Amino acid sequence: MRQNQRLLLAFLLTLWIAVVAPMGIQAQSGNQSDVTGPNPLEIVPRGESDGTPTSAVDNTSVQVDRSTYETQLQQASLSQAIQLQEEYQALQFCNYLKLTRCGQVPTLEQVVQLLSQIARTTETKAALIYVSSQGTQLETLTVFPTQATASGKSLTPAAIAAATQRVSMPRLSREEVVQVARQWRRTVTRQGQGRDQLLAPAQQLYDWIIAPIAEELARREIDVLVFSLDSGLRLLPLAAMHDGQQFLIEQYAVTTVPSFGLADLQYADIRQQSILAMGASQFANDKDLPGVELEIQTIAQPPWDSTVFLNEAFTVNNFLQASQQDSFGIIHLATHGVFQSGSLDNSYLEFSDRRVTLSQFGEMATQLQWTTQEGPFVELLVLSACRTAVGNEEAELGFAGLAVKLGIKSALASLWRVSDVGTVALMAEYYLQLTDTPIKAEALRQAQLKMLRGEVRMTGETIQLSNGEQLPLPSALQSRDEQFLAHPYFWASFVLIGNWN
């Protein structure tokens, strides 16, 4: 056996002994669908089929030597590198989120097979892009769906190789990449920045991450880019990367996953789901959100079947009771969500009666059986007024791991707190697009494009949607001037995490 293979196996064995073995591997007998068949990715942290979660294992003391990991990754074959990436990401998220278990990671063949199954079912082709920013180089590993074999049949080594692409950029340090990423984020969140200041870092990141695979993405007619990002890059507004002519969102729907194995990729038509819509416009310990009532009232309209709790009714008890009485496929919370460094107790959501930490929200999800095999499946959790600490890995893990922690399929949340007008506009347009485009990532793309192209805008006293509907703004948000929402500050903040279908 070659030296690099021995090193890789030794590294994976170390991870197994330290993290996976103590948790145990559990079959995902309940995590199945007609689309994918039995899910081969046993890492999704749902509990036992009898509703009793396995006991949590605190592995926060387990650390991986980053330089050793990078050396292993550079020496590994492509298939080994994919599994190493999955193992490393799972370790990070499972440790920080204190997940009840982490099982087997997917093989490269399983990733290709599932991407291919999803493409056949949804008629939407997604490419999975791992981005690893290492000490001395930037590396991307891209996996494409294939039509080489029928569903359920093994792929040949040649078919697997043809469905992958590896790009390494030597002499591009992690420090340099993270510095540009932070500069870009700062410029996007400032509306007053000039076009050159805004686009320079956006184009640089595009040149590093997308340009080397752009030709292959086009040749394969890819529709959705699914990113699994390294630490320091998980809070990027990826949709606003720019090729010098157009934003990335003008070519592709964009979404993120903590890792492929940590995403629940069952498909369900979201138009068949009911909505629990809750929120408050005033807060004792935080800034008011004067657009919340309009936001909730707008999304809770036919054809959606909705239950609404506003202001003083937006309580933890009402949330729990409503969720226990009905199986809502969509939960929309128009409130402050804050992701900060440190423990899960430092990140929280504001209800009208009290603050709920991310750790407590996880306990509520367990109580509601979201994390069990036979509990209700929440297709989408929407948090429309989040803000996340930049430059901190723990805050990144809390935000990017939200769907995994709560046992839900997808989360749509904002990287920074957008203006109330911008939030109402995007949320109203998003639900409008979902009725015609029941692919969550594509519906988000269409809503973002409508804002970018001026089809959704503020007319002074109203918000105009792409179908011509006028939403009357509360007096606190009205203006004498028409306001376009084309700047990425308004639309690039919103990120879909997890299942993109």
Image: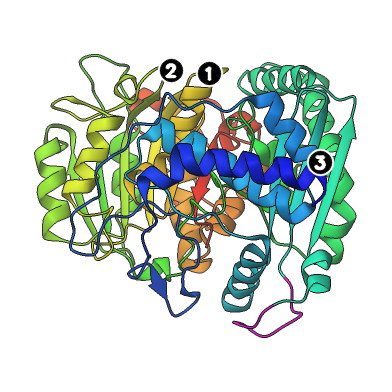
Q: Taking 432 as reference, is 236 above or below it?
A: above
Asked if residue 214 can be seen in this view, the reply is yes
**N-terminal of the two: label 3 or label 2?**
3
Q: Residue at x 46, y 36 (%)?
A: 18
| Residue underneath mark 1 | 392
Q: Earlier in the sequence, mark 3 or mark 1?
A: 3
Q: Residues within 10 Å of mark 1 (few under 14, many from 20)?
A: some
Name the residue at the bottom extreme: 150
148 to the left or right of 432:
right
Give the number of the mark in front: 3 or 2. Answer: 3
Q: Which residue is mark 2?
A: 341
> The disc labelled 3 sits on which kind of residue?
Gln
- Residue closest to the eye, 191 or 73: 73
Q: Which mark is residue 75?
A: 3
From which residue to which does the magenta span run? Answer: 146-154
| Res. 495 in view | no
The image position of residue 382, as x and y in percent, is 38, 45
Q: Residues within 10 Å of mark 3 (few under 14, many from 20)?
A: some
